[in-house]
Image: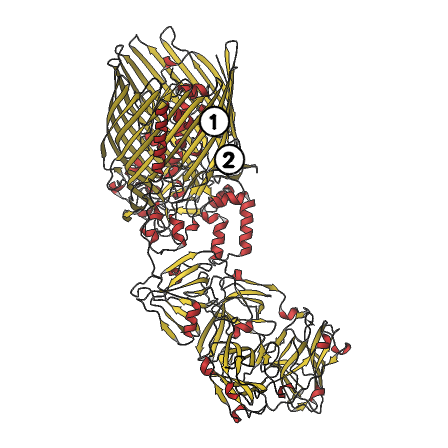
Amino acid sequence: MKKFRYIVMAVTAAVVLAFVSCKKDNEKPSINVMDEGEKWSVSAILDSLGKVETFLFDEYEPASVDAYVIGDERTGNIYRTIYIRDEKGGCIAVYRNSGTEDFQAHAGDYITLDLSGAVAGYYNGLPQIQLPAAGVEPDPNVRIIIRQRNVDIIPTPATLKEVNEGKHLCDLVKLSDVQFSDPNHTYAEYESSSDRGIEDCSGYSAVVRTSNYATFASDSLPKGKGDLVCVVSLYKKSESNKTWQMLIRNTSDVNMNGPRCEDEGETVKELPYNQSFSTTFGTYKPYDCLGAQTWEIDYSTAKMTGYVDNTNYANEDWLISSQVALTGVENAKVCINYIARYFQNINNDISLMVSRDYVSGTDPKEYDWTKLDVEFVNGSDWNTFITSEVSLNDFVGDTVVVAVRYLSTEVKAGTIEVKYIEICEGEPAEPGTSDELQELPYEQDFSYSFGTYDTYDVFGDEYWTIDYHTAKMTGYVGNTNHANDDWLLSSSVNLKDAASVTAEITYIGRYFANIKNDMHIFVSDDYERGKNPNDYTWTEISGQWSESSDWNTFKTLTVDLSAFAGKEVVFAVEYTSTDIKAGTIEIKSIVIKENETGK
Amino acid sequence: MKRILLLVAVSILCVNAFSQEEVTVNDTLKEQENTIMPAVVLFDTDFDEVNNTTDVSGFLQSSRDVFSSIAAYNLSNRRFRIRSFDSKYTDVMINGILMNDPETGRPYYSNWGGLNDVMRLTTITMNTGMAEVGFGGMGGLTAISTRASLYRKQVSVGYANSNRSYNNRLMVTASTGMMDDGWAFTVSASRRWSLKGYQDGTWYDAYSYFLTGEKKINDRHSLGFTILGAPSSRAGGSPVVQECYDLLDDNYYNPNWGWQTDTDGSRFKRAARVSNYHQPMFQLQHYFKINDKMQLNTTAYYWMGRSGSTSLEWNEGPDPRPDYYRNLPSYYLYKLESGADGYTWDGYEAYLNEWVNNSDLHQINWDELYAANSRHLMTVHDANGITGNTVTGLASKYIVEERRQDKNMGGIATSFKYDVNPRLHINAGLMGNVSKTNYYKLIADLLGGDYYLDIDKYADGETFIVSDAQQTNLRNKNHIARKGDVFGYDYVANVNKINLWAQANYIVSRFDAYLAAQGDFVNMYRKGNYENGHFQGNLSYGDSEKLNFLTFGVKSGTHYAIDGRNYLFANIAYRHQAPDFRSAFVSPKVRNTVVDNLTTEKLFTVDGGYELRAPNVKARVSYYLVNSSDMNWNRSFYYEEKGVFVNYLMNDIKKLAHGVEVGADLKMTPTLTAQFAGSIGEEFYTNNPRVNVYEDNNAEPIYQNEKVYLKNYYVGEMPQTVGSLGLKYNAPKNWWISLNGNYFGRYYMAVNPCNHTASAMAGLYEGDARIDQLLEQKKLDDAFTLDFYGGISWHIKEYYFLLNVSINNLLNKKDITLYGYEQLRSDYAEPERFPEKYSYLYGINYFISLTIRR
């Protein structure tokens, strides 16, 4: 009997084991499969758009893109569009002429988007993927896979300056310390979309555009300064009429409740402390010590003149910065970009002053000031700005105030227009060193200055500057392309003892019509410094310039200078742009060296 | 002596004791999602009470099935159903009268709740075993006898205290036994009550009464009668989304109540969902002992009474339920993230804090409902169908309605028993029932208003003009309903049934075999008393098509005695069963339309096993299989895809349930006994049924014959792996204690069929995260509980005292999900909008009773 019982138990166990596998997999309804085909990235699409105006994704050839949705239409402010960003940070708009209920994708979704039949191109300046409209064969439905929801999308930290330079088009950015220029409005008017100006304390500005269909259109603008998360868009009516538009997704992205720029002059700035006077004085305050004339914003500059209506007037007027801490650096300098004309004694009438004890809003003459040793120059026209740099090393470690003092008399009153003042780490370009013959290896880093290099502006309003720790040149300013021809010229370099020489340029170039055509490398053995390069003989060296997909990835191009071995030459990089397309180049360094292999 | 306690039957079927909730299912708030939706589910009072009857070990000894008795006693806590059968498939009879509701097929124990003392004479047939008073359901038969002469003479008084559904119970029973004059009487009455149940906002108020008498005419004939009833009123809770539990940090949150300010300024708790039942039954019995071998028992009965439950109803106002998804902080967040105007992060934080800390938000705000009504002055023209009858008054936006099912049923049942010889026994019977249940709803409270405009709020209409489509009853247009008036719908469910059954039991040598068969004729039809504006004429008014079903069932089984201790057994059964009334009509509330392709349900079951009956060991191991087909599933809910209220009907569902059951009762010492019951089983769909979806107020179907991909999904709604291991100590001095550990695993939630259709997948592509959200079957966490039972009895003179203690969930685990289900409202594009709903097992709870008997 025991044996029988064991048999029963064994049978029971077998049955248990048997039916554990009895149930099969759950049946499911058939699920559509999207042939993802060729996998594109947003960055690749943008790179392709760098070569052609538009291109079509074949409607019968599967293709798709994976990206994060960073902006959607739910509030009604972004019209029939979602904005997407890929892993590399490439951003683009996706538009469909039938409403984004088709997308079902929201900000925070990670999606795969079918590109079949889509057209990529620039629409009114905005890089965009336009999906087939509803009802258009072969498949009217937007094919999208939402792979993940509620991804934490980090807005890219950005500045208005960068936005104006086209650095964050279509991206979700966080602008810090910005304010509405005139906050006494609602986001949009009742029956029309509206543009509202925003600015930062450095004077850079842009536009926040809000549709009157946005759910927050009738909300009042915030009065203060703070953070704004928005999508950077662009609307181009014509070549000469383009507007950078910041698109707010919803008002939870707006946190602007802090003191405004004009109310926080007392805040101590940190390096770099840059102030542009294109629209406001920003963090600078004028102080009128004498005379009826005062500093004003004119011609996109801070302008002071005692010459009014053909009459000279006596004035003493100061343009005074906020406090800036020259701490944490070993050297510092101040750069002033200006045009000054009609001064009789310019270095007496215009002074750069520094004080350690000045109290904002009070009479500067009651404090101690040090006059900086800087040479001001009377200009010959109202177009050519001059940059003068002077060291602040004597004040390193202190918190100081920098000021421009203007003096005029009833006998003579000059005019000065200051475009910007920059206080930053670094040494001023030393005069005289650029004429010295350089020996190999000849390395020039452009983090803080041009150093031994010189620049020459052949034509165009734009010019080489030191920006983002690079030598930077762009003809794209204020949403507009400008024609330019600008040269970056080395000092003479001695190649007499070298057999094989190369020049290595580390750079980032973006948004050119054709970078290989727009950027040139030249060598001359007869160029005279400070002169127009077009008057001398140059040999062009073919360089494999290529564009980067972001502002962080530097490329290096190397050219062979062996043909010039045995000579003393000047090495130059020429930038060109047109009114149609102007790229941006940032050169980190140029190294001319002997090739060790001797090749 | 067989004493199969009511406990077993109640235990097996306890989850459906709250099926009174089903009374409200199709109507409640237009969003009813599951007919097996518990209120305060866990501890049905009867179940608890039966747990505490006299002698647990005696209970076990008296049970013929060691697995069922242990499993039912300990494992039904988490909705375990033996062999996946719900109560619909288990017949319950009192004196041969089938107590299962004719419309739903389920027995409602609340009809005789509190009458434990007089419901002890119970014979339980498990599954398809052999019974003497009827064919039985596929899940078994519980036959209760209240024949007065069978009660021994006694008087008993008992008091119990508990923290479960009710707090107090008082019970008195007296039996004369058979007296010299040939009369026997038994009377019993009880009162159960609590001002506050385990959950806030719940309470219990119930009475019960019972009188049975028998007159022995002579040695052959006896006449008897039984009168029983159990009027009760109780306020219950309901499952909610997890968000509510998390926000309030309370797994027993009940959204169905709120504070109301009284006229004197004091505040009192008021529940919205209150059920009221009183359905007394009257029986006359005739016991005819034809001869020593034949017995013919006949019972005629009349069963009537009310069954109702209240809930909030509204028109022209926002949904007042605090757990309605639009009233939850998650909806504010959803609107905020969607960029809707007026929603801010500060606003979300404020609303979240307010919802959590202000009971007027997370409970029903009764004062606000009154206030809304007090501001709604309205004029109705041609009121009550009378031209020129203009009525101006406060038209309630919010009311409390009572949905009623008033029973009116009668019939007769006779059973015949013939012991042909010691080997052959024959049983047969005939039953006939006529049932008319009136379904309607009435105004229970106008909440300060003067009237409620009785129109279909989901129908299209124009301002100031009530269209015909909006009329709930074209024969009383623009009905101004006042307190106590019937409104909304009114129909009678007619279900008439004749059942004939017969059984032969043959014992030869070591074999004990039986064969039984039955035939049913079921006639059902709907009689509409309202002519609905959407379904004019006979589409809603008058008699519907008469539905007739002729069904049959056969079963057979055998028991083989290997020796005096070891047995083998096997059973097989096949049965056709008429669909229940509610599954036969598309929307019985408003129209006469019969479901297309309506057919009978088919069930096939087979089981077999081994049984050991030794002096110190009782054990049983068996395998079972239940194959069901053409099952019906009929629900009404708000269909998100179309934005309308729909009736969702599946009629060709196939399911398979199978598993292994093991039970053992091992007497290790004269005082120490170990008990074990365990089951590993599964129930899953074996086909992809077709669904027809009808808009509630439109005759045209939205979907016809759409395939629902359910194949191989678990049916769910119960743990499929269970086990209970206990140790019991019986002291020589008439006291005992028992400790039981219970395990519940593989508990899958019932899926929402809407999500398993091509329609749901239409806009989705492979790899989309929403596909898993829609198709994945969720599983509740496995759980373990510990229960304690104890008792002691003693005598003082002629009085017998019995003290019983039952403590469940000794470990006080409050995070065990009792029940969960996927909401039927589903957004395919954003599935997370309508998450699952849950209710939780009570923490530590007790039941202590003292009975004095003489």
Q: Residues within 10 Å of mark 1 (few under 14, many from 20)?
A: many
Give the residue displayed 34% in from the left and 59% down from the top. A34
Chain of residue at mark 2: B
In which quadrant is the N terminus of chain B drawn? top left
User: Is residue B110 among the parts visible in the rendering?
Assistant: no
Chain of residue at mark 1: B
Q: Earlier in the sequence, mark 2 or mark 1?
A: 2
Q: Quadrant of residue A345?
A: bottom right
Camera-side residue: B243 or B627?
B627
User: Is residue B419 among the parts visible in the rendering?
Assistant: yes
- Asked which secondary structure carries label 2, the reply is loop
Three-letter residue code for mark 1: Gly
Question: x and y percent of residue A302 in the render?
Answer: 63, 80
Residue B241 vertical position relative to residue B660 in the rendered view, above or below: below
Three-letter residue code for mark 2: Gln
Say which residue label 1 marks.
Answer: B726
Say which residue label 2 marks.
Answer: B199
Question: x and y percent of residue B298 in the render?
Answer: 28, 18
Camera-side residue: B629 or B32?
B629
Tell whether A177 sits left or right of B325: right
Q: Quadrant of residue B232?
A: top left
